[in-house]
Amino acid sequence: MDSRTVNFLFAIGVLFGWRLILFWKKRSEPALVSTGPDRWQLSQLLLASFLTIFTELTVIRWIAVEVRIFAYIKNLALLVCFLGFGLGCSLARSRLRWLNAANALLGLLLIVRWPWNGGRIFEGLSQALGAASDVEIWGAGNSWNWGKFVLAAVIASVLLFLITCIFVPLGQIVSRQIEAAPSALYGYSWNLTGSLAGIFIFLGACRLMLPPTVWLSVVLAGFALLQPDRLTRYLMAGLIVPAALLLHDPATKDHFSVWSSYQQIEFTRFRMPDGEMVAANLLVNHVGYFYIVNLSPDFLARHPHAVAGAPEGDPFNLPFRFGKAAPSVLIMGAGAGNDAAAALRNGSRSVDAVEIDPEIKALGNEHPEHPYDSPKVVVYLTDARNFLRRTHNRYDLIIFGALDSHTQFSDYSNMRLDNFVYTLESFQEARDHLAPGGVLFLKFQVNRPWMGERLLALLTRTFGKSPVVFRTNLTAISPATCYVISSSDQVEEAMAADPRLAELVTRDRVSFASPSPVPVTTDDWPYLYQKERWIPRTYFSVGLLVILLGLLLYWQVPEARGRRPSLFFFAAGAGFLLLETQAISRLALYFGTTWSVNAIAIGALLATLLLANVTVELQSRPWRRPFVVIGLLLSILTAYLIPFSRIPGSTRYVGSLVALAFAIPVFFAGLLFAEEFRTVDSPSSALAANMLGAVCGGLLENLSLVVGMRALLLIALGLYLLAVSGLRTRLSGPSRRAALDLGGA
């Protein structure tokens, strides 16, 4: 019996004891069903607000690693977090659902960490839900099986339901405290402050590479502090023990996992019988990523059969057979050093290695050839596209290495880390950084013919001619489809001068044929893994699950069913989520898809809303709504119309203009929300409608797969027009006269 199974069984035993104590306590006095205090407690609001965001980010990041479909489907976990919080706001005057939340959290852990073929079950779930020919989801095929799909949909619905339940009591406490605050807007301002703290503390934990055990411990400790009595606090805190047992991953010297700022990395060494390391395997979020492999002449001479196909056909040495001698090299997606080691073996005079994940770079210290120790190699820990925009160097050889991502850049947008790397504009920038006679060499694991055709079309449009395309033979280590191209005749001349190279390329040449051409990716439509400008069937299916879950849950809540939601707060919630998504994605394009950019962008958005709240509070008279509405609509339209890519100047300068262009509509949106929220009759109902609108906005974000990212601003504009119409409707009749007397529109 392995250690994970032992931990699982021990955790079950601890939970059984916990339930017995809870049963005894409930018989003597109700515990986790307390309605809680109705008096204003700033500490409770701050803690609940902090926990809401911290728990959101914890669940989103952890579930995306354990159940892969959550990593690839738009904002899936985030939407049900919003759904649960909004449901809690609707239940503000009901008993606190702490017992349900605790059961849901531990139930989620038990299901996802099931030790008996649990990995295969969730791999099958991702394959069944992700099987489609119009989108590439790693590990999912083309075949659609209705039986497997229905079973997978049921399991996914259970997971979504459990995530939803976790956030209900947090929504209850936040909405209660905002209603009990001296003013609704005052309480909402402190809610934003707690949320800001939650974001930065979680991102700090990720920066320190703390594992999910720490994240869940913080969540459960926070839950415990919000309980009404000492014994209940101890009971809730006691859940940290089974949670830690369930999350523990056994480790050895040659096999361990780490959580970087971006992803989970599993590292496994492979050794020769004499103990010498021959290779190491890196898995990212449980998916094969790449191998660290020793291709040095000395090692291959001593172990000629250790690596099949090396060095003749390996994708690391091959780029240097097409370029000049002693080249200057740029490696984008340098990983743990395979390409850098090859560059040194082939006599490169300088190597700039760009890698976004510092932990992957640190694992490069395990590389048997130690390329990152060479003075010729300079490592840049940044986003590849951002490096291209900032560097002034030109290179004889540019290599696109291990860039195909399994990871989202932000939990608040549908951007993968590599989205802006494989676009037309990115390849044009790379071309402009080639020295005369320079060569661009791109390696990619092409699983669908249309993906290969897209990369072919991108390079053809960039260079005005077709690249040489072939597949490498090093299947035991790193299979790849290779694209080689130059603005000059360097590639053709290299093949003419090296008959063995020409023979290899001819033998393994690849051609892509499609009945209809696929659209090329651009900075406005950067969806490399999607075949056409349409919403894939997989996204429709999972989106329908979220809608059905939301309707079912709200229908079961009399407080929500019997109250008509505010059109203003609903539409404003949907519009703001789209505005937020656009701001984060555009800033990523100019400042990089790094964790720090993500943190600063989200924090700046919340800080802007907080500034809007303070501005409204400090005003002796309400802002005139026509001014705020016109400012909001015009600023959104301006952000849509400005061609930022054509503005001359440095990347930092243009990026600052982008930040300003999006800060203005966010500020006006905050003003409009704050003015309405401070006079609302039921803050909890307004928050519930706003969260439900955010869920709708998250679903509407899928439209960017059809119309592009920039057009989301027009959809946000339409939603805010709808919100304004709801505002006019709400102010009709007697309440309108009162608003006019206060200086309203």
Image (spheres, rainbow, N blue to C red):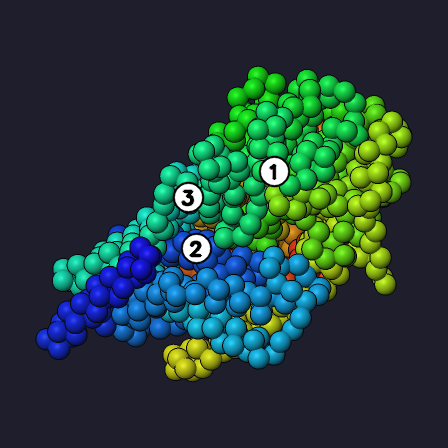
Q: Residue at x 53, y 25 (%)?
A: 370
Task: State the quadrant of the C terminus.
Answer: bottom right
Secondary structure beneath label 3: strand
Whether residue 605 is visible, yes or no, is no
Image position of 456 with respect to 502: above or below? below
N-terminal label among 3 and 2: 2
Image position of 733 with respect to 59: above or below? below
Q: Amino acid under label 3?
A: His
N-terminal label among 1 and 3: 3
The residue beneath circle 2 is 62
Q: Amino acid under label 1?
A: His
Q: CA distance from mark 3 to mark 2?
A: 20 Å
Labels 1 and 3 touching (C-beta < 8 A): no
Labels 3 and 2 touching (C-beta < 8 A): no
Q: CA distance from mark 1 to mark 3?
A: 24 Å
Category of crowding for the residue at label 1, using alpha-carbon neighbours closer than 10 angstroms: few (below 14), some (14–19), many (at least 20): few
The residue beneath circle 1 is 305
Residue 553 in the image, given as x and y percentages of width and height: 44, 77
Residue 326 in the image, given as x and y percentages of width and height: 73, 19
Q: Is residue 248 left or right of residue 445?
A: left
Image position of 423 with respect to 80: above or below? above
Category of crowding for the residue at label 3, using alpha-carbon neighbours closer than 10 angstroms: few (below 14), some (14–19), many (at least 20): some
- All told, the count of numbered labels is 3
Q: Kindly identify which numbered label has been placed on residue 255.
A: 3
Secondary structure beneath label 2: helix
Q: Residue 594: name its quadrant.
A: top right
Q: Residue at x 30, y 51 (%)?
A: 218
Task: State the quadrant of the N terminus.
Answer: bottom left
Category of crowding for the residue at label 2, using alpha-carbon neighbours closer than 10 angstroms: few (below 14), some (14–19), many (at least 20): some
Foreground: disc 2 or disc 1: 1
Foreground: disc 3 or disc 2: 3
Depth order, front residue of 177/345: 345
